[in-house]
């Protein structure tokens, strides 16, 4: 095992949403190793997304500590968190979150323009198998293609970490497998640490480790001795 | 171009209708400023240049007969740089084929060279040859009104003798830009003209060889006008001199000044209101538009964009809209400004036109609009940027709604569920609803302030022409006449009633405020020309005391019961103190009024008249006109009906033209506000409305929920809009009030109705345009965002 890229201790997050208070994360301790592929499983509201958002610097924990390598994220200002995201983190969201008024190429360029050593946008799109659809707008692409544009956008800056929130949630199985393939390919070629949130239990077979979430806690950790290829998945 | 900039242009294109609507609101504000201030500046500069190039004098005086030798003495008054002495006489003229008697100011031209002051701009033909008594030049408006070209002829009664005259040229003069005949309120180019004749010829007609009856003086920069006037008065005193006066009391200049003042006041009142209203509306609209971008802002933050970068991106978007607005406003404002300038310039017969370039206006209008829009955007951006990206990327948490009434009372029995949704939505966002109402109320208000001038003009006409000065005609005499002239005039054909009238020039003073006015004398039982007090009731003059214009009362700071000091400027000059016995409601000029006999006692004269007011039988007008033309003692005649027609044609036209332009711009702003409001409400509630569609609501039902709210807010906005409109109209009325003309604030119900109708029509048009949007609502796409 290589050294830890994320170290979390007693991470807790409480939301106030409207008039309700929600305990989203409850005292979570966790280590993630470099180049690892981790799948986060669990029912809605079990804390997966909250953890991912905090790791990605999109949100602040209410208490606890979180380190990215030697950098303590829990102490950072908004500005430093922005820099952290800009340098190290790639996001893939369930609903792609592409800018509808930009083409596939331009959506990727949106990120490469503010990165230090990015790939060329077409290179990133090539990597996810979309070399032929560079100049299509999101509305002209299928759901799977849109999600692969989102992956290309996430990896184009060569991030250390790829955080994927339900990347196949809105897709059918065939398209979902293609997206997982793209993610694993990036992990293989670039050594990007990859965290994938999913509701789909069959995806766990592609991971090094599987974290099971319940009520804001990690209830169980499963380590896979061998990782399956995406093509071998059945769902 | 960076991907963000590409996004910006594509977003602008996608939202083109809204971008255009906001830009139109900005454009409306910008256009008003450029139009109003720009046209005023152009006209003002043109007038200045005209005065300068044609040597318009600074001080003017009349005398009966002053020897030419006096000219040297006048030239030696300290501060005087040039003197022009000439002969000027009022006379009746008879134009072939024109039944009404007309009159003209005859002015002499030097027989060698040009006049030193008040030079002519020759439009056509040539100047009269020295000594040729039949050759004349007339002012262009008079020539145009009668279709005169050089070669045409007319006759005039000069010094009691009828003479045939031939026009050899037409001209313009800075001294007679605005020509109002004696006893008239309005210029009437058909019935009053300026006629220039060779000095030698005019002198021999009036037996004024080696003498003059009118003198103009040019002052050094910084010279004291009042000192020169005093010296001039004392020099002319022995020669039948009437008190000298400065430009302020020169008829043409004073009216021109007043018209430009009105334009200036309009430009100081309406454009700031329009600009501020449009700035406020843009602020409101853009802040809501940016609020809709919440999820995109969250995404940009998630991707690693810094706050400053995001702010700059949205400010660029705002700047783009503002630039489009300023461009539209500048083009429209400049074009309208050119038209208005040309319209006024035509009206004044300026020989040339200088268009003032006003880059500062574009800068002011642009900066104000940009600041308002920018502040609107930043206010919301700050809110959104404060949110962690994970939160911003999600739709806002469900807002906390409350029951409108206690749970025990179930409203849904009274109103339908959609109505309840609408009511809750309004009560949930009271601030937003209030601002929406305020925005629409302002739209109504600027319409009211654009439309109300018509009402006040009608009121002015009603009081002036139908309550106060009800005579059909006024004939003026060359010199004072004994009162029995009234009986003679009453015997002329077609005369139903005749009342004596006289006017005396005075200076009126209270404390250290003084004004030069005329006091008119009339009989107490006068029924044609009545005095109307501020409560619009006729006043019967007591045997002593003075009634004054209420405006004059304000200027002097006196009311009924106070005393004023009066310097008589004619005949036996003396100063006396008179009690003010009534304040008069009048809208033109500032005046005093007295009992005819009291005025005669004041002048230490027997009862004399200078004019007679008449009521005429329409059947015999032509016979009456013919009889007047044959009277050598008559200097001119004023006709009320013609005066009213001229008022409608000129002043009212200018004012209503401006009002129409402002109404047009206000309509554009009103539409922009309402449309944006409807569109943004739709975007804000797209998810909710799409959910309703999925639940089985028809398009019509969904539309109703959205439009019901728009309709309710639009209706709620109307009464405050009327109140604000009245307030703005009051500000404008107060700013427009001047000594030469003013109005009473009258806003008819129909004006409120029209203003509201325009806003409601804008709302209906917006509803139709929004309906298209609802029909295109992509249910799946709208609902496919994360919960």
Image (spheres, coloured by chain):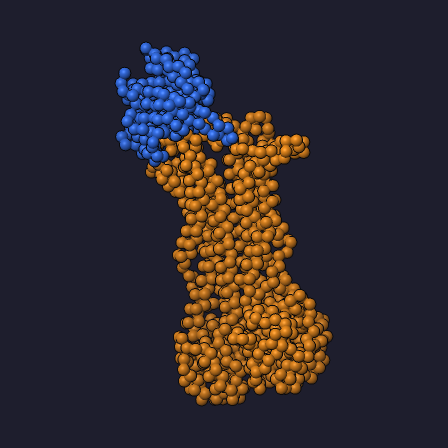
> Which residue is at a point 53% across and 58% down the rendered structure image?
B658
Point out residue B576 in the picture as x, y percentages from the top left corner.
59, 82
- Which chain did the image draw in blue? A
Q: Position of residue B296 (x, y in %)?
A: 42, 33
B538 relative to B289 in the view: left or right: right
User: Is residue A69 visible from the viewing direction of this image?
Assistant: yes
Picture quadrant of residue A138: top left
* Residue for point 35% across, 15% down: A209
Q: Which residue is nearer to you in this view: B650 or B323?
A: B323
**Residue B436 against residue B501 in the figure, above or below:** above
Quadrant, the N terminus of chain B:
top left
Instruction: For residue A144, say whether it is visible.
Output: no
Residue at horizontal 40%, vertical 42%? B315
Chain drawn orange in the picture: B
Please give the name of the residue rendered at 38% of the width and 33% of the height, measured from the top-left corner: B300
Relative to A176, say whether B307 is above or below. Answer: below
Residue B396 at x, y = what percent?
A: 48, 32
Q: Is residue B342 above or below residue A87?
A: below
Between A66 and A234, which is closer to the camera in this rendering?
A66
Question: Residue B255: where, in percent of width, then height?
Answer: 53, 69
A17 left or right, relative to B708: left
How many numbered marks appear? Answer: 0
């Amino acid at each position: 095992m290589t050294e830890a890229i994320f170290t979390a201790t007693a991470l807790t997050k409480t939301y106030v949403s409207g008039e309700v208070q929600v305990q989203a994360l409850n005292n979570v301790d966790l280590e993630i190793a470099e180049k690892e592929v981790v799948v986060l499983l669990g029912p809605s509201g079990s804390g997966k997304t909250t953890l991912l958002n905090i790791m990605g610097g999109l949100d602040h924990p209410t208490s606890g500590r979180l380190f990215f390598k030697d950098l303590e994220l829990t102490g950072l200002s908004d500005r430093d968190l922005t820099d952290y995201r800009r340098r190290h983190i790639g996001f893939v969201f369930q609903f792609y979150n592409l800018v509808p008024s930009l083409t596939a190429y331009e959506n990727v360029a949106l990120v490469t323009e503010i990165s230090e050593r990015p790939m060329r946008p077409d290179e990133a799109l090539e990597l996810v198998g979309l070399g032929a659809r560079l100049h299509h707008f999101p509305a002209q692409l299928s759901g799977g293609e849109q999600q692969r544009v989102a992956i290309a956008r996430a990896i184009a800056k060569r991030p250390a970490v790829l955080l994927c929130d339900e990347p196949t949630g809105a897709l059918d199985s065939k398209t979902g497998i293609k997206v997982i393939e793209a993610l694993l390919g990036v992990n293989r070629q670039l050594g990007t640490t990859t965290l994938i949130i999913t509701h789909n239990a069959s995806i766990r077979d592609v991971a090094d480790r599987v974290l099971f979430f319940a009520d804001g806690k990690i209830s169980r950790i499963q380590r896979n001795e061998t990782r399956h290829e995406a093509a071998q998945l059945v769902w | 171009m960076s991907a963000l900039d590409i996004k910006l242009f594509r977003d602008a294109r996608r939202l083109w209708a809204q971008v255009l609507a906001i830009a139109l609101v900005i454009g409306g504000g910008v256009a008003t400023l450029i139009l109003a201030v720009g046209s005023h500046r152009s006209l003002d500069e043109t007038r200045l240049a005209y005065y300068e190039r044609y040597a318009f004098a600074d001080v003017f005086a009349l005398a009966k007969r002053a020897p030419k030798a006096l000219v040297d003495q006048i030239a030696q008054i300290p501060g005087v740089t040039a003197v022009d002495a000439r002969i000027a006489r009022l006379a009746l003229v008879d134009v072939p084929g024109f039944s009404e008697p007309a009159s003209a100011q005859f002015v002499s031209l030097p027989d060698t060279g040009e006049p030193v002051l008040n030079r002519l701009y020759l439009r056509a033909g040539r100047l009269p040859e020295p000594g040729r008594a039949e050759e004349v030049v007339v002012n262009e408006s008079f020539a145009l009104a009668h279709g005169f070209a050089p070669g045409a002829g007319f006759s005039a009664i000069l010094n009691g003798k009828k003479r045939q005259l031939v026009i050899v040229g037409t001209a313009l003069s800075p001294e007679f830009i605005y020509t109002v005949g004696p006893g008239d309120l309005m210029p009437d180019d058909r019935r009053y003209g300026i006629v220039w004749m060779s000095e030698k010829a005019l002198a021999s007609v009036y037996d004024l060889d080696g003498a003059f009856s009118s003198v103009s003086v040019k002052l050094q920069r910084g010279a004291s006008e009042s000192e020169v006037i005093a010296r001039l008065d004392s020099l002319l005193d022995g020669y039948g001199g009437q008190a000298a006066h400065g430009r302020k009391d020169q008829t043409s200049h004073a009216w021109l000044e007043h018209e430009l003042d009105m334009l200036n006041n309009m430009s100081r009142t309406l454009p700031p209101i329009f600009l501020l209203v449009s700035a406020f509306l843009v602020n409101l609209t853009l802040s809501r538009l940016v609020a809709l971008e919440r999820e995109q802002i969250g995404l940009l933050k998630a991707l690693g964009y810094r706050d400053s970068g995001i702010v700059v991106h949205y400010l660029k978007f705002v700047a783009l809209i503002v630039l489009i607005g300023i461009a539209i406003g500048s083009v429209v404002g400049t074009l309208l400004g050119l038209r208005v300038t040309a319209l006024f310039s035509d009206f004044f017969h300026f020989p040339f036109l200088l268009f003032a370039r006003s880059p500062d206006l574009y800068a002011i209008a642009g900066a104000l609009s940009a600041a308002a829009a920018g502040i609107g955007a930043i206010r919301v951006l700050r809110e959104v940027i404060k949110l962690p990206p994970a939160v911003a990327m999600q739709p806002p948490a469900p807002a906390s709604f409350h029951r409108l009434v206690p749970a025990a009372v179930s409203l849904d029995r009274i109103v339908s569920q959609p109505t309840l949704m609408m009511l809750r939505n309004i009560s949930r966002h009271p601030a937003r609803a209030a601002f929406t109402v305020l925005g629409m109320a302002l739209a109504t208000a600027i319409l009211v302030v654009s439309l109300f001038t018509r009402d006040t003009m009608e009121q002015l006409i009603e009081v002036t022409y139908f309550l106060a000065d009800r005579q059909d005609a006024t004939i003026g005499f060359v010199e004072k006449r004994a009162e029995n002239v009234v009986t003679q005039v009453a015997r002329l054909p077609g005369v139903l009633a005749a009342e004596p009238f006289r006017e005396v020039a005075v200076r009126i003073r209270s404390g250290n405020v003084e004004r030069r006015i005329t006091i008119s004398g009339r009989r107490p039982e006068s029924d044609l020309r009545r005095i109307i007090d501020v409560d619009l009731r006729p006043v019967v003059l007591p045997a002593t005391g003075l009634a004054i214009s209420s405006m004059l009362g304000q200027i002097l700071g006196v009311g009924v019961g106070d005393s004023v000091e009066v310097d008589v400027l004619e005949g036996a000059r003396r100063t006396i103190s008179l009690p003010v016995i009534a304040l008069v409601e009048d809208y033109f000029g500032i005046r005093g009024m007295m009992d005819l006999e009291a005025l005669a006692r004041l002048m230490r004269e027997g009862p004399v008249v200078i004019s007679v007011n008449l009521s005429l039988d329409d059947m015999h007008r032509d016979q009456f006109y013919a009889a007047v033309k044959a009277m050598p003692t008559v200097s001119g005649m004023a006709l009320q009906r013609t005066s009213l027609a001229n008022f409608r044609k000129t002043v009212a036209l200018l004012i209503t033209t401006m009002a129409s332009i402002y109404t047009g711009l206000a309509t554009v702003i009103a539409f922009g506000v309402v449309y944006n409001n409807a569109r943004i409400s739709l975007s804000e509630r797209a998810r909710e409305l799409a959910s309703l569609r999925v639940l089985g609501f028809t398009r019509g039902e969904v539309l109703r929920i959205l439009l019901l709210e728009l309709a309710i807010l639009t209706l709620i906005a109307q009464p405050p809009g009327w109140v604000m409109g009245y307030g703005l109209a009051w500000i404008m009325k107060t700013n427009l009030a001047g000594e030469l003309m003013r109005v009473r604030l009258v806003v008819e119900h129909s004006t409120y109705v029209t203003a509201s109708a325009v806003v409601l029509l804008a709302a209906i048009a917006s509803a139709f345009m929004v309906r298209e949007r609802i029909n295109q609502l992509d249910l799946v796409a709208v609902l496919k965002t994360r919960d």
